[in-house]
Structures are given as C-alpha cells and as structure tokens.
C-alpha cells in the first residue's frame, strides 16, 4: 500500500461523529468563554488552530488530539479570571513576606533584605537580559519538548503531557487554598489587599526597556490572577522537562541544557521579583509531587492508566 493510499484511508476514517463533536466543543468553548471571561481574539485563534490541525492531515490530527491535554490546561488557567482565588480565602501578603525575610533574608549594610529586594539593588543589564531570556522559555520549552516526543515516542509524549496537566492541577488547588501576593505587589502596594490588581511586569520591565520592546508588558497584561504566586509554576515546568530528559536518558548535552534552563528560571523568578524563594521551592515540590503521583497512578492501572493508554493508541 502506498503512502498516499494509506493517508487517504486515514482521512476517510474521520467520522461524521468526530466532526460534529469538534464543532460542538468549538462553539461551546466560545460561548462559555464569552460568558465567563468575555470575548477575546485569542479564543478564535485557539479554535481556528485546533480545527486547522485536526482537519489538515492525519499526522496533525494525532498531534492535536494528544496536545488537547495542554489545551485543557490553557483553558482552565484562562477561566481562573472568572473565579478569583481571593473570593475563597484571604490573600497572604505580610506573613509570606516576613517568612521569606526570616528564612532567606540577606544582610547588607546592617539591614536585612529579602532576596528580591537585594537583587533590585544589585541588578545589571546582563542579568536583566539573561533573566528575560530564561523567563521567555517557560512555555516554549515544554511545548517544544512535547513536539520532540511526538515524533520520537508517542507514549512518552502522552506521559509528559499528562504529568504537565497533573502538576498544573495541583498548583491550581494550592492557588485557591493559599492565595499569595508576589514580591512586586508588596513593593508597590505594601501589605494592604487591593482586589483585582492588574498584572505587572515587575523586574522584567528592564528586559523590555533594554530592547525597546513590550513583550513582557503584553504577556502580563493578560495574567489570570496576580495572587497566584505560590507555588511558582514557572519553576515547576522546566523541572518536568528535566525529569523526562533524565528518565529517558537523552544526550548529556540535552540534560545540561535543560538543567541550566531550570536553574535559570528559578533564579529569574526571584531576580525579577515575580516570586519569593519560598514560591520557587513550592513549585519544585509541586512538580515533584505531580511526577510521583502520575507514576503512582500508572502503576495502579486504574482509570488514569486506562485513559492514558487510550490516548496513546489514538495518537499512534
């Protein structure tokens, strides 16, 4: 059988039911998004891209089917705007700041500073640019890593994405149980709670200023909730990537690169005043817990095991 014939056969396998389900999901997503967070062009872009990939070719259909796990995360994160975590629990501001200073405080000229405050006084252009580069990689690296596994090992592709989703769900739970203000909030508003505070680029503004651009300003203007600093999922994502690189024994160069990116993002999170060291440690704990939990669920061979394997078969 020729490749062309095989591809045509796979296209014929696209059932009417699958088309109707995707159409219903697309319309339902747009309507629900409009009701919860209002209309945004990003929503149309997402729906258009998903439909394009699903109907374009059999290989892109398999990719977007597996990548739907990541899409679920993105949608849930966006919907957090509709249900701010400070509606459900008080925001931790002063207690978190003082805990950071007590545990990780740095003494300089007879005064104790948090690591964030210390780096504000010792910032420089090199670290500004380096931190910005690391912070820009927090989503492209996991996406690129997932694409790598799609073409190399579909099972690891699904395992990685399920772990990614599980770590995020754990993080979201903590966001609502323990709403926390980031360091930059204390620097601008003190210890008073100001609801619906807009997102802020904090120390990343120095990266934008250095290059004369507004990339981080644009990104943080779309933030779902500024009181979601604990845990730092920025710090969790690269650790998931590093774990799967080590687990699958990728090349030493890949391991070193991912290790550098991981540590770089941890440093940048604190350097730019987006997170406390405590937030970073919580992110590391969140990633570790999600990885262990996913492996445990697979070993039990229950509903998660069956769902994962069903998706693996769908993308083969």
Image (tube, rainbow, N blue to C red):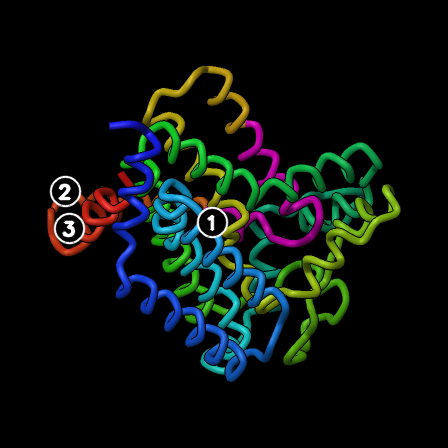
**Can I make out residue 289 in this image?**
no
Is 309 a magenta residue?
no
Left or right of 119? Residue 37 is left
Tell me the SS state at disc 1: helix
Label 3 CA crowd tier, 10 Å (few <14, some 14–19, many 20+): few
Expressed as whole percent of the image width and height from the top left, the position of residue 155 reads 27, 36
Expressed as whole percent of the image width and height from the top left, the position of residue 300 reads 11, 47
Dot 1 or dot 3, earlier in sequence: 1
Return the residue at label 1.
Answer: 283
Marking on residue 306: 3
* Magenta stretch secondary structure, dominant: helix
> Which residue is painted at 71% across and 42% down in the image?
132
Alpha carbon distance from label 1 to label 3: 28 Å
Tell me the SS state at disc 2: helix
Return the residue at label 2.
Answer: 299
Between residue 120 and residue 290, name the one nearer to us. Answer: 290
> Which residue is painted at 27% across and 42% down in the image?
9
């Amino acid at each position: 059988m020729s490749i062309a014939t095989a591809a045509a056969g796979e296209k014929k396998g696209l059932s009417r039911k699958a088309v109707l389900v995707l159409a219903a999901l697309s319309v339902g997503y747009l309507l629900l998004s409009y009701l919860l967070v209002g209309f945004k062009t990003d929503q149309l872009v997402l729906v258009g891209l998903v439909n394009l990939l699903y109907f374009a070719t059999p290989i892109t259909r398999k990719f977007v089917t597996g990548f739907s796990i990541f899409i679920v995360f993105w949608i849930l994160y966006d919907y957090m705007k509709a249900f701010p975590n400070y509606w459900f629990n008080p925001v931790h501001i002063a207690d978190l700041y003082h805990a950071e200073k007590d545990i990780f405080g740095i003494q300089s000229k007879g005064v104790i500073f948090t690591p964030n405050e210390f780096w504000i006084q010792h910032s420089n252009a090199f670290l500004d640019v380096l931190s910005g580069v690391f912070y820009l990689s927090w989503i492209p690296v996991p996406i690129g890593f997932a694409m790598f596994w799609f073409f190399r090992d579909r099972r690891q592709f699904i395992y990685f994405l399920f772990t990614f989703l599980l770590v995020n769900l754990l993080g979201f739970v903590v966001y609502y149980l323990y709403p926390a203000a980031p360091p930059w909030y204390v620097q601008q508003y003190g210890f008073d709670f100001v609801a619906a505070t807009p997102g802020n680029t904090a120390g990343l503004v120095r990266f934008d200023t250095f290059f004369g651009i507004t990339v981080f300003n644009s990104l943080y203007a779309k933030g779902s909730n500024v009181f979601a600093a604990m845990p730092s999922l920025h710090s969790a994502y690269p650790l998931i990537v590093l774990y799967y690189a080590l687990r699958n024994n990728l090349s030493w160069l890949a391991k070193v690169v991912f290790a550098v990116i991981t540590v770089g993002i941890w440093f940048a999170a604190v350097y730019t005043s987006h997170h406390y060291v405590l937030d970073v440690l919580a992110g590391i704990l969140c990633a570790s817990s999600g990885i262990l939990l996913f492996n445990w669920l697979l070993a039990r061979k229950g509903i998660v095991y069956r769902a994962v394997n069903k998706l693996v078969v769908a993308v083969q």
